[in-house]
């Protein structure tokens, strides 16, 4: 097997899958998917190094950019779009860039991934700086658009990383390689499957762990979630009620007084202070509830 093209190889375990019944196909699916966990586990040290770099960038007011095409690009856009409601951060803090632009999120834009120049241009258009980190997502590790973006980002002085499911190519402009080797796909070349799932798991780790270390949670509670709809309003009330051991009516009262900020609401109640004073205390405590309610 050519290790540089694992994602394009024929999977011997599914070569006659069309002759199987549905139960058999599902078992093959499940067996192949079980390989993903081990593949991600094998690169946890590399993921840690990348996350430390992401945190460093955030602490220097930098941003995280994902760059990909097709499924890889969509996964980056998805992860980025989930950060504001989950962690209460600005939409600019984590951004997803997909070859072909917004329309490519919903439909295939043929040829969008083939231009290194377009990758270069999007980095310049986004005004990426040396304080930022750009993570390319490419199952094959060879997508021209992604490599063009990473090369330009490194020339600017930004940190760079590449998530792929093939062996590393050792480009000098890539600081971090995350090689999630999941083997050939169930359907040859359909990297939305195992490679895509591995990518989603890694992206979950990158942003979630980074946000935990940026004090965007308290324990395992989403204390910085953005109260933007009724579901999240109710979740916010429930969080405050449980953390303070108060009724839901009191929790709602303080959530409203805090202008929808859970940490501020908790600090206001705990210390009997105004919203302005609570904001000041949190700012002095690195936006952490540790020591304020513990």
Image: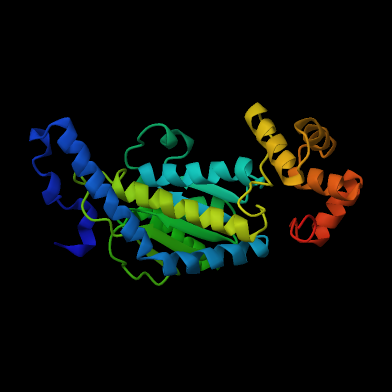
Exactly how many numbered labels are in the figure? Answer: 0
Establish if 185 lies above or below 38: above
Q: Nearer the viewer, residue 208 or 155?
A: 208
Residue at the spot x=79%, y=30% of the render? 249
In the rendered structure, the answer to whether residue 180 lies left or right of residue 200 reads left
Residue at the spot x=37%, y=69% of the render? 171
In the rendered structure, the answer to whether residue 70 lies left or right of residue 29 reads right
Residue 73 shows up from this direction = yes
Residue at the spot x=74%, y=43% of the render? 262
Quarter residue 85 falls in: top right
Q: Quadrant of the N terminus?
A: bottom left
Q: Position of residue 148 (x, y in %)?
A: 41, 58
Residue 115 shows up from this direction = no
Quarter residue 146 falls in: bottom left
In the image, farthest residue toward the top: 230
Residue at the spot x=46%, y=52% of the render? 203
Establish if 252 lies above or below 182: above
Q: Position of residue 251 (x, y in %)?
A: 78, 36
Q: Position of residue 279 (x, y in %)?
A: 84, 50
Q: Quadrant of the C terminus?
A: bottom right
């Amino acid at each position: 097997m050519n290790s540089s093209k694992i994602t394009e190889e024929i999977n011997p375990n599914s070569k006659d899958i069309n002759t199987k019944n549905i139960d058999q196909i599902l078992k093959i699916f499940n067996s192949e998917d079980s390989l993903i966990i081990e593949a991600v586990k094998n690169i946890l040290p590399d993921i840690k190094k990348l996350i430390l770099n992401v945190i460093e960038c955030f602490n220097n007011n930098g941003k995280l950019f994902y760059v990909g095409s097709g499924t890889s690009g969509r996964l980056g856009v998805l992860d980025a779009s989930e950060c504001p409601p989950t962690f209460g951060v600005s939409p600019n803090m984590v951004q997803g860039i997909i070859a072909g632009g917004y329309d490519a999120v919903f439909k295939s834009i043929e040829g969008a991934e083939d231009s290194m120049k377009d990758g270069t241009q999007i980095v310049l258009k986004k005004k990426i700086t040396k304080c930022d980190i750009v993570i390319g997502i490419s199952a094959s590790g060879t997508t021209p658009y992604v490599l063009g973006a990473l090369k330009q980002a490194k020339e600017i002085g930004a940190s760079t990383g590449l998530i792929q499911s093939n062996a590393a190519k050792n480009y000098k402009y890539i600081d971090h390689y995350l090689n999630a080797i999941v083997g050939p796909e169930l359907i040859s070349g359909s990297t939305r499957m195992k490679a895509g799932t591995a990518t989603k798991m890694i992206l979950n780790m990158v942003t979630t762990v980074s946000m935990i270390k940026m004090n965007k949670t308290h324990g395992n509670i989403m204390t910085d979630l953005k109260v933007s709809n009724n579901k999240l309003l109710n979740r916010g009330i429930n969080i405050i009620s449980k953390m303070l051991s108060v009724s839901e009516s009191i929790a709602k009262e303080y959530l409203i007084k805090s202008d929808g900020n859970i940490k501020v609401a908790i600090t206001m109640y705990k210390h009997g202070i105004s919203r302005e004073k609570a904001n000041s205390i949190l700012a002095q405590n690195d936006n952490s509830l540790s020591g304020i309610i513990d």
